[in-house]
Amino acid sequence: MGNLDPKKMAGYTLILGPILALVCFFIQPGGVLQIGGSAEPLDYAGQMKISSDNSGLGIITGILVPVGLITLFSGIMFYIQSMEGGNGFGLARIGLPFFLIATAGWTLASSIFIGFSSEISTNSDLAGLAFGINIISSISFGIGGMILALAASTRNEVNKNISYLAFIAATIVFLTNFILPFSPESGTLFQGIAGICFIIYTVWSILIGRALAK
C-alpha cells in the first residue's frame, strides 16, 4: 500500500469515525429515532425485547458504534500528539484518558445489547448495567470533549467560535448525564439532547479532520 501519511490518516479517522458512530447511534433499535419501537428508560425487559425483535439491526449497530468510536479515538490521539510543542498540548493531554474511558465504556454497553439482539443474553437486568455504563461513559466523554475543545480553541486548525460551540455541546452532554442518575425517567429526553450535541461535536471533528487531511 506504500507509505500512508499519518497526519492524513488521522484526519480521515476524525471524519469517518464520528459519522459512523453517530449514524448507528441514531438508528439502533429503540434509540433516538425509536426504530423498532421504544421503551421507557427503566423498562429493561422492553429494551431487551426491542433488541431481540430487531436482531439484525441491533447486532450491526452494536458492532459499528464501537468501530466508529475506536476510529475516532485513534484520530483524537494523533491530534493531541500533534499539538506537542505548541499551544494546547498540556491541556489536551489531560482529556485523553477521559476519551479512553468513554470509548471502553460505550463498547462494553454495546456488547450487552449485542447479547440481547442475538439472544445470547436473556437477563434483562443487564440493561440496567448498560444504562449505568452509558452514563459514566457519557460523563467521561463530556469532560474530555470540554478539555479538548478548549485546547483546540488556542490553535488554528478550525475557527475558535466553532471550538467554543463544541465546548458548549460537550458541557451539555456532561451536565445532562450528571443529572440523569438522579432522574432516570428523563433518559429518553436526555438521549435526544445528547444526540444533538453529538451532531455538533461530529461537525467540529470533521472540520479538524479536514484540516489535518489537507
Image (cartoon, helix red, strand yellow):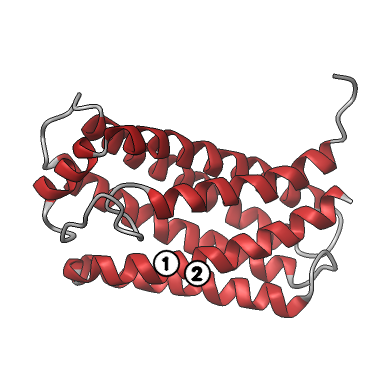
Q: Which quadrant of the view contains residue 210?
A: bottom right
Residue that appears at 61% across and 71% down: 166
The residue lying toward the viewer, choosing from 177 and 67, is: 67
In the displayed image of the protein, which residue is found farthest to the bottom? 161
> Left of 50 or right of it: where is 192?
right
Q: Position of residue 99 (x, y in %)?
A: 53, 50
63 or 144: nearer the viewer? 63
Crowding near the residue tagged with mark 2, few <14, some 14–19, many ≥20 C-alpha atoms within 10 Å: many
Left or right, residue 180 beside residue 87: left
| Front-most of residues 113 and 152 | 113
Q: CA distance from mark 1 to mark 2?
A: 5 Å
* Amino acid type shown at disc 2: Cys
Q: Residue at x 90, y 20 (%)?
A: 2
Which quadrant is home to the N terminus? top right
Q: Image quadrant of residue 146?
A: bottom right
Instruction: Please tell me which residue is depicted at 26% across the width and 45% down the height of the picture.
Output: 130
Q: Which mark is residue 118?
A: none
Of residues 189 and 84, which is closer to you in this image?
189
For the residues labelled 1 and 2, say whether their Cβ atoms are less than 8 Å apart: yes
Picture coordinates of residue 136, whole percent (x, y):
35, 55
The residue beneath circle 2 is 197
- Is residue 105 rendered to the left or right of residue 73? left
Can residue 148 be seen here? The reply is no
- Can residue 140 be seen in this snapshot? yes
- Count of marks placed on residues: 2
Q: Secondary structure at mark 2?
A: helix
Residue type, mark 1 in image = Ala
Q: Which residue is mark 1?
A: 194
| x and y percentages locating residue 114 in the rendered image | 30, 33
